[in-house]
Image (cartoon, grey):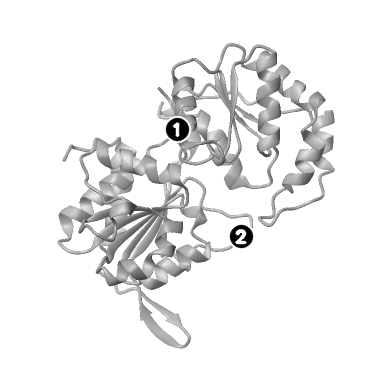
């Protein structure tokens, strides 16, 4: 097992997590008039780009070294996040069980999607697979019923949630899931200390055509954000896309970056426009085959592609330090979504 080298702030966060999870006090909650024991739990907030996965891997190592029984379940809501955590565990020589063997092999660490876990919960129970520690990546999604069901099935397990944005547009509290919140310094502090990249921020004019169009958006989706259909109707037009290109040419000429689009059609329209005007671009979305996604990201890293235009792919769990600009081609009312997106451009080489 390789040593996990942490920065000072990561070491401090690890120590604080361990302190909360090993607190000797009994955790009891009231449910339907009776006391119910709960495992200790903590949500951790660290800005995008400050190495949450390294801290998570260190917590896994601590648990394995400290407890002879109980598995570690690392749970995420997207395949890309599962794969990223698997790569981190491999890097430090931490063995884990993949979902194909989850019901057949006795292991101490499992990396699973919440969707797979929900479908196979009873089978895992019958196989004697019991978590002593549950780690939730991008834990701002833990409000979902699937995560609450997971926590209820394994009340006595220790629980750790990691996120850059512990907030939801619905304003629902995480207090019923996590007993404590640990926060790291703000992004500006990390920038001042050289852990995150400084940035220039350019915004469309208050009375520009595009901003006035956004101001008139009335529809709201199920998550409370702008309605995708209306955004596509009003903003997926040649004039607006050309202005997006002009802004890249003016403020990020010669740099490579990520563009966040409204939907699949919008992403392809942007990529087509940018390519026609000399900016090597590719559109990626949930329907893009995994191999092509991987190949295009590698081509981006290698400088063969200037621009990755994506739909909800790189707002969470995308690690690529050489991103030089972020373009928000879609508006959002969600603070969490916004911070996740723009944070992808703050990593240092």
Q: Which mark is residue 124?
A: none
Q: Residue at x 47, y 38 (%)?
A: 48
Structural crowding at the residue carrying mark 2, measured as other residues with C-alpha within 10 Å and reported as few (<14), some (14–19) or many (≥20): few
- Secondary element under disc 1, as helix, strand or loop, is helix
Q: Is residue 231 above or below residue 27?
A: above
The image shows residue 304 at horizontal and vertical percentages of 50, 15
Instruction: Specify whether residue 184 is in view.
Output: no
In this rendering, position of residue 42 left or right of residue 59: right
Q: Quadrant of residue 46?
A: top left
> Among all residues in the image, which is located at the extreme bottom?
33
Q: Residue at x 45, y 65 (%)?
A: 177
The quarter of the picture where the C terminus appears is top left
Q: Earlier in the sequence, mark 2 or mark 1?
A: 2
The quarter of the picture where the N terminus appears is top left
Q: Which mark is residue 291?
A: 1
The image shows residue 310 at horizontal and vertical percentages of 59, 33
Near-viewer residue (238 or 249): 238
The image shows residue 152 at horizontal and vertical percentages of 41, 72
Tell me the residue that label 2 is attached to. 171
Q: Nearer the viewer, mark 2 or mark 1?
A: 1
Q: Is residue 12 above or below residue 71?
A: above
- Total marks in image: 2
Q: Residue at x 69, y 13 (%)?
A: 277
Near-viewer residue (220 or 119): 119
């Amino acid at each position: 097992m390789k040593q996990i080298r942490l920065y000072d702030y990561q070491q401090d966060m690890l120590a604080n997590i361990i302190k909360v999870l090993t607190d000797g006090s009994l955790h009891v909650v009231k449910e339907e008039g009776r006391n119910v024991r709960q495992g200790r739990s903590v949500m951790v907030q660290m800005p995008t780009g400050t190495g949450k996965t390294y801290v998570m891997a260190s917590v896994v190592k601590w648990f394995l070294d400290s407890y002879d029984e109980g598995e570690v379940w690392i749970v995420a809501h997207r395949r890309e996040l599962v794969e990223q955590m698997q790569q981190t565990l491999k890097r430090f020589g931490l063995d884990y069980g993949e979902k194909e063997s989850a019901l057949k092999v006795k292991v101490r660490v499992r990396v699973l999607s919440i969707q797979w876990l929900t479908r196979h919960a009873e089978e895992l129970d019958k196989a004697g697979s019991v978590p002593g520690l549950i780690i939730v990546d991008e834990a701002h999604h833990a409000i979902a019923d699937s995560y609450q069901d997971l926590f209820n099935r394994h009340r006595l397990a220790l629980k750790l949630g990691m996120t850059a944005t512990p907030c939801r547009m619905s304003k629902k509290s995480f207090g019923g899931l996590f007993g404590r919140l640990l926060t790291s310094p703000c992004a500006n502090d990390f920038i001042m200390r050289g852990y995150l990249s400084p940035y220039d921020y350019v915004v469309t004019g208050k009375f520009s055509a595009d901003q006035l169009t956004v101001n008139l958006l009335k529809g709201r989706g199920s998550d409370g954000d702008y309605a995708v259909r209306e955004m596509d109707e009003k903003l997926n037009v040649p004039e607006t896309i050309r202005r997006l290109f002009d802004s890249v040419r003016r403020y990020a000429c010669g740099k490579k970056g990520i563009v966040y689009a409204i939907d699949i059609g919008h992403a392809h329209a942007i990529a087509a426009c940018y390519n026609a005007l000399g900016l090597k671009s590719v559109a990626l979305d949930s329907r893009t085959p995994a191999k092509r996604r991987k190949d295009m990201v590698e081509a981006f890293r290698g400088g063969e592609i200037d621009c990755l235009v994506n739909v909800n792919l790189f707002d969470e769990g995308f690690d690529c330090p050489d991103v030089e600009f972020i373009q928000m081609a879609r508006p959002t009312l969600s603070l969490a979504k916004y911070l996740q997106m723009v944070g992808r451009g703050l990593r240092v080489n």
